[in-house]
Amino acid sequence: MVRPALPVTLAERLQAIYPASSRRALKRWLVSGRVRVNERVVRRGDVTVDPADRVELGAPPPPAFPAFLQRVWEDSDLLVVDKPPGLLTMATERERERTAYRALAGYVTGAPTARGEHRRLFIVHRLDRETSGLIVFAKSAAAKRLLQEQFKARTVERRYTALVEGRVREASGVLRDRLREDRALRVHPTRDPRAGREAITYYRVLQRRAETTLLELVLVTGRRGQIRAQLAALGHPIVGDVAYGSRRNPLRRVCLHATRLGFVDLRGRRVTFESPVPSAFHKS
């Protein structure tokens, strides 16, 4: 006489179906909603299932967008995010894990396209660790090439807002320098016409206060540390930029924010993205 199969728990059924999988893996499947019993998601392993019940394992859920980044725009070719201060754009010898690129690469490559293909993420430009604001990544090689050509041709619109020490006298102006890096990788202007690289930044005063000035800056060139080095050389270091001579740090950050980013996308459209100036910049 053959005895009918008895009910078992869902965890036991999964272990029988996938004997090579660990208990930890089974628990992850349940918690993430991958397990279905008779086409309904079940997240508890102690639920009883009958022999006739249909148990299925669905595809992994798409990776979540990194919580510490703000998504401004995303399509099949581009990803524009608002980066917080204190976060590297890309890895360095000292820090390889917590970067905007690594977090976003995990999100992008983990989400297959409609054809089942996995995308890649490409770095186009970067912001300093201390700088917050807009940055664009490419999700295709074609988008990367197009954007890099525009950065090289200086046709990308890049606007920043900085809170600097002191009262800037001129309402607007242009900063032209040759910047070089010292042995400590600190960027400085140099008077030697044969050294360094050309750096051009336009500025205008947005607001003057007793001890600080709020500036809007437009990059023509995009050298590393350009705005920070040029404003320090002007005698108005960015508030909180201790590395470049600031004596005040009320917000415990460098008060520099990338507020506007504009370029031509793969469809030939001129697109522009904006990020509001941190409200604290208006109060310090």
Image (cartoon, helix red, strand yellow):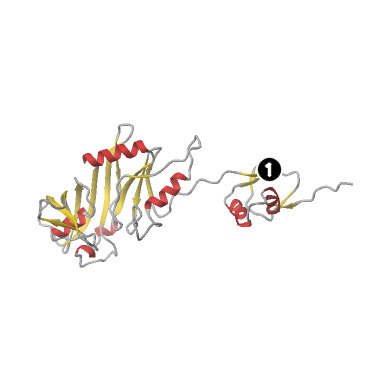
In the foreground, 216 or 35: 35
Which residue is found at the position 59% from the left and 47% from the top? 34
Name the residue at 28% across, 59% down: 280
Using residue 243 as the reference point, say whether residue 98 is left or right of it: right
Q: Position of residue 103 (x, y in %)?
A: 42, 52
Q: Is residue 45 something one can see in this rendering?
A: yes
In this view, the residue farthest toward the bottom is 247
Which residue is farthest top? 268
Residue at the image position 47 percent from the left and 49 percent from the top: 64
Name the spot of residue 171 as percent of width and height, x first: 11, 52
The picture places residue 36, in percent across and down from the top left corner, at: 64, 45
Query: Does 246 appear above or below 67?
Result: below
Name the residue nearer the viewer: 268 or 20: 20
- Density class for disc 1 (Cα within 10 Å; few <14, some 14-19, many ≥20) is few
Percent across and percent down for residue 89 are 34, 52
Relative placement, left or right, of 69 versus 127 is: right
Residue 93 occupies quadrant: bottom left
Q: In this view, does 90 lie to the left or right of 62?
A: left
Q: Quadrant of the C terminus?
A: bottom left
Q: Which amino acid does label 1 sit on?
A: Asn
Task: Report which residue position mark 1 lands on.
Answer: 38
Count of picture labels? 1
Residue 271 visible in the picture = no
Give the residue at the far right of this rendering.
Answer: 1
Mark 1 secondary-structure assignment? loop
